[in-house]
Image: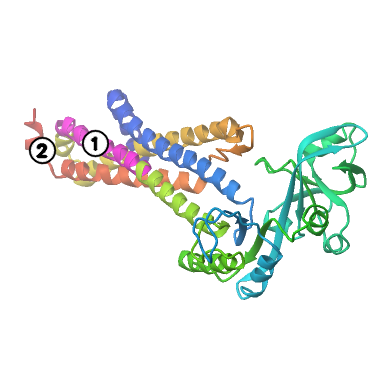
Amino acid sequence: MFYELFREIISSVRRNKLRTALTGFSVAWGIFMLIFLLGAGNGLINAQMQSSDRYLANSMVVFGGRTSKAYDGLGEGRGISLRSIDMMTTDSVFAGVVDRVAAVYDKGGVTLTTDHNYMTGQTLSGVYPANRDMNKRQIVGGRFINDIDMRERRKVAVVSEDQARELWPRGGSPVGRTLRADGLVWRVVGVYRGDGMGQATDVYCPHTTICAIYSTDSRVGNIEFTFGGLETEEQNTAFEADYRAKLNLNHRAAPDDENSVWLWNRFMDNIQMAEGIGILRTALWAVGLLTLLSGIVGVSNIMLITVRERTREFGIRKAIGAGPWSILRLVVVESVAITAVFGYVGMLCGIAANEYMAATIGRTQVDTGLFKATMFADPTVGIDVCLQATLVIIVAGTLAGLAPARRAARVRPIEALNDH
């Protein structure tokens, strides 16, 4: 019985090649566009996620700014430099929220020299050991700055892979070697991997050493710290206002002056990014499902036309003894077969398109001259989503063919034979 049913479906497809092709194209196109759009959207989302993953989410960086209001007898436009008192305020006043406090003091425009080569325009960056975790730095050789370096104010340095290749072109590990910067000799203790965002020119040194050499007025550079307990946007906004007010008072600036101290809250960045990603995902699914729906509507319309064209055939079948169930089964199985075959073809084409994107633009970076950024990463869709989308259109194709099939099963033979 299955063999006969299969032969009837094949015969019907051969007699109506154009109709079958149009039905199949509607189905395949709907599946293809859904998978392709989701893959392209995932490529954009993954690139943004990689960019945000370079920093610890529950961390904040504080920068000195310039006052925008007159306060306490002082005019606006004063430059604010963060000092050791601001670090003490961060660590003590906000001890219930702040976990680890660190700082970054940069000395730019430095020339690095070795016995083999030199590099200009580099930066000596004084950091704390916690800087590695806060900025997720990858150490590929040696180690990072540690507490003993800080305590003893050692002249040790961690260089980037690019700096290592340039300063020691003959190869070999730079760990244990020395380099000169601003007339001082530094011993290399580690090598880090640059993140492609303009930070591979930094040479990391102990913060205490850099401040002892270059900071003579207790300036500490930028403050960075990790925090906990701030789970919502409202909690973060309230903390930022309170924290800024306390630091402003240390510098005789208006407590509500938002320009005197700048805060980079990475947790808030992640919240905003998550909201944007959620909107993008919703939009992609909406467009994809509408495209899928157009395929389902196409199947339904063509099946209605099919039933109309085969009304006389169904009348003859019923006249010679075919029951309503056999007519219903024929139409539904034909609809399911066409939908399943072309849905599978559309799924394969969508997967192939995503794999092509991954192999071509999925690994490219945009080079602005200052930094490199990945704009598209891993533009693929899980096989579970592909199978679910295909299953949805098969079920939809079954439902689309069910209504005209029931109509065909109820037709009276005499009416069908008189149909023109």
Q: Which of 32 and 5 lies nearest the eye of the viewer? A: 32
Q: Which of 69 and 381 lies nearest the eye of the viewer? A: 69
Can I make out residue 377 in this image?
yes
Name the residue carrying label 2: 413
Location of residue 65 with respect to 365 vertically, above or below? below
Task: Please tell me whether mark 1 sits on a helix, a strand or a loop.
Answer: helix
Magenta stretch: give its range.
288-313
Query: Of the residues under marks 1 and 2, which one precedes in the sequence?
Result: 1
Q: Residues within 10 Å of mark 1 (few under 14, many from 20)?
A: many
**Residue 303: mark:** 1
Residue 328 picture location, percent across and down: 23, 44
180 relative position to 13: left or right: right
Viewer-nearest of discs 1 and 2: 1
The kind of residue tagged 1 is Met
Q: Quadrant of the rendered structure where residue 371 is?
A: top right
254 relative position to 188: left or right: left
Task: Please tell me whether mark 2 sits on a helix, a strand or a loop.
Answer: helix
Query: On the rendered image, what quadrant is the C terminus found in?
Result: top left
Q: Quadrant of the rendered structure where residue 355 is?
A: top right
Q: Which of 117 and 143 lies nearest the eye of the viewer? A: 117
Q: Residues within 10 Å of mark 2 (few under 14, many from 20)?
A: some
Q: Is residue 311 magenta?
A: yes
**Residue 354: mark:** none
Residue 378 picture location, percent across and down: 57, 40
Residue 283 picture location, percent across and down: 38, 46
Query: On the rendered image, what quadrant is the N terminus found in?
Result: top left
- Distance from Cα at disc 1 to Cα at disc 2: 20 Å
